[in-house]
Amino acid sequence: MPTFKQLIHDATEQCMKIDLPEQTALTYLVELTQQQRVDLYMNMNLEVPKDVLEKFNAGLVRILNHEPMQHVLGYSWFYGYKFNVNSNVLIPRPETEELVSYILSRVDEMFPNQNITAVDIGTGSGAIAIAVANEEKHINMYATDISVEAIEVAKENAKINEAQVEFLVGDMLQPIIDKGIKVDVLISNPPYIPSKETLESSVVDYEPHVALFGGDDGLKFYRTIFENCKKIVKEKSFMAFEMGWDQRISMLNLVHEYLPNAEAEVLQDINGKDRMLFVYFK
Ligand code: SAM
Ligand code: GLN
């Protein structure tokens, strides 16, 4: 049997040959050993137990085939919480953790210690809704998705993370409009990739297209939301969106067109890319 150190070395070489990130093999092995409660860093020079080695090798074949590691593991981490994922939901992205953190700080500023209602439109794995609901107990949280399969995964994740979220299936704002719910905060990370854009195979071959593509210019879902949001947002409220790094001008133009009296702010992610749009009704 190889030692952990040799295993990481050899697997990393294979990953780098096909341009996977250098950390891939190590990250995968850290997850597998944590499941077995083995402290990898203290045991680098020990031989890898047979069962771990077999599991690692079987998963590595899939990873080398460009299948996302999170699918091989069956879960992903988001804002410190564990989320089950499968091919019916988008794997939650690190940029979206930044969106959650800005939402929490804006809630503190605009609604300090108040009980408020929020909705996450297109919740997928439930990542945003569950993280926000667990971090801010004053929020009464709803989440919607058009995909019944995604909502099943999201419900499972709410249970695992003991989050109080009410899930509804339906098209964009419709389930919230139908129930007559009014919200203080509207959140959405809708599909925003233009239909014709080419994506890496780990994304386009394994992640649901209903979670990725937002029409010809990628902006179709923002238009729908801006057009209808007044039916569900309260007079004093805000909306928080994730967006594509190159959509700043078109997004600000859309806000101006549909919501001329609102205040808009585009925020950058940790890589300095335009990534979030906040719209305030004060
Ligand atoms: N909120 C999750 C996150 O941030 O990781 C998932 C975001 S994913 C980019 C977009 C989600 O919108 C997918 O879960 C997809 O099923 C959902 N969706 C697509 N079209 C929709 C529609 N017409 N109405 C509601 N949800 C929709
Ligand atoms: N950030 C995702 C990607 O690059 C897309 C998410 C979205 O469309 N909202 O694959």
Image (spheres, rainbow, N blue to C red):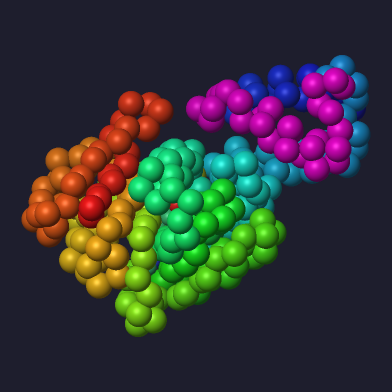
Q: What range of the chain is rendered magenta?
A: 16-43
Residue at x 81% of width, y 26% of height: 40
On screen, residue 28 versus residue 277, left or right, reads right
Q: How far across and how far down the image is residue 159, in percent?
A: 67, 64
9 or 94, which lies in front?
94
Residue at x 77% of width, y 25% of height: 7
Which of the 4 quarters of the picture holds residue 152? Answer: bottom right
On screen, residue 213 versus residue 14, left or right, reads left
Residue 258 against residue 249 in the figure, above or below = below
264 or 251, which lies in front?
264
115 or 3, which lies in front?
115
Q: Quadrant of the N terminus?
A: top right
Which of the 4 quarters of the picture holds residue 27? Answer: top right
Q: Main secondary structure of the magenta part?
A: helix
Q: How far across and how far down the image is residue 162, in percent?
A: 67, 60
Does residue 19 show up magenta in the picture?
Answer: yes
Residue 81 against residue 268 in the figure, above or below = below
Residue at x 51% of width, y 48% of height: 92
Q: How far across and how far down the image is residue 80, in percent?
A: 62, 41
Residue at x 84% of width, y 28% of height: 39
Residue closest to the far bottom:
178
